[in-house]
């Protein structure tokens, strides 16, 4: 496993920590880097995470706007 360099292991640790919901600051502290480097350089999102994000965005866009309380009072 010559491809499993320290950098590969660090990136894997960062990405799996993010996916598992580990606090980003704690995870970056464990890797010995600042939060910006950890999140921007070492973490990557897998397809499952990208699909979930897309579904959330679609739900937000397609959600019917709720009527204002004043509108409900007028129609009652």
Image (cartoon, grey):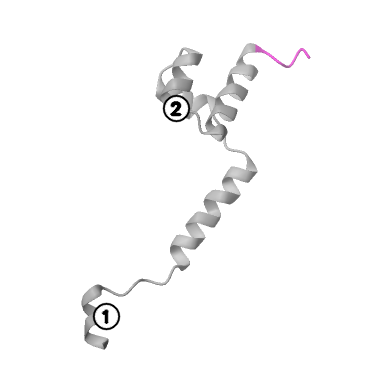
Q: Which residues are magenta?
A: 1-5
Residue found farthest to the right: 1
Total label count? 2
| Viewer-side residue, 64 vs 7 | 64
- Picture coordinates of residue 71, whole percent (x, y): 24, 80
Q: Residue at x 54, y 53 (%)?
A: 54
Mark 2 neighbour class, 10 Å CA radius: few under 14, some 14 to 19, many 20 or more = some
Residue 12 spot, x, y in % from top left: 62, 24
Q: Residue at x 63, y 45 (%)?
A: 48
Q: Is residue 66 left or right of residue 71?
A: right
Q: Which of 66 and 47 lies nearest the eye of the viewer?
A: 66
For this orientation, the residue located farthest to the front is: 76
Residue drawn at x 41%, y 23% is 25
Provide residue 1's location: percent of width, then percent of height: 78, 14
* Quadrant, the C terminus: bottom left
- Dot 1 falls on a residue whose secondary structure is helix
Task: Where is residue 20? Give x, y as percent.
Answer: 56, 33
* Magenta stretch: helix, strand or loop mostly: loop
- Comparing marks 1 and 2, which lies closer to the viewer? 1
Instruction: Determine which of the numbered discs, if any, sits on residue 55 in the image.
Output: none
What residue is shown with label 2?
Answer: 24
Kindly identify the residue that appears in the image at 57 percent across and 29 percent down.
15
Does 71 sit left or right of 31 as displayed?
Answer: left
Q: Is disc 2 placed on a helix, strand or loop?
A: helix
Bin the neighbour count of mark 1 within 10 Å (Cα to Cα): few under 14, some 14-19, many 20 and up. Answer: few
**Lower sequence index among marks 1 and 2:** 2
Residue 14 quadrant:
top right
Q: Determine which residue is flagged by label 1.
A: 72
């Amino acid at each position: 496993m010559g491809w499993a360099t320290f950098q590969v292991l660090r990136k894997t640790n960062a990405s799996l920590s993010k996916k598992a919901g580990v606090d980003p600051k704690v995870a970056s502290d464990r890797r010995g880097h600042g939060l910006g480097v950890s999140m921007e350089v070492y973490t990557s999102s897998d397809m499952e995470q990208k699909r979930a994000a897309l579904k959330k965005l679609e739900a937000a866009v397609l959600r019917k706007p709720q009527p204002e309380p004043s509108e409900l009072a007028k129609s009652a």
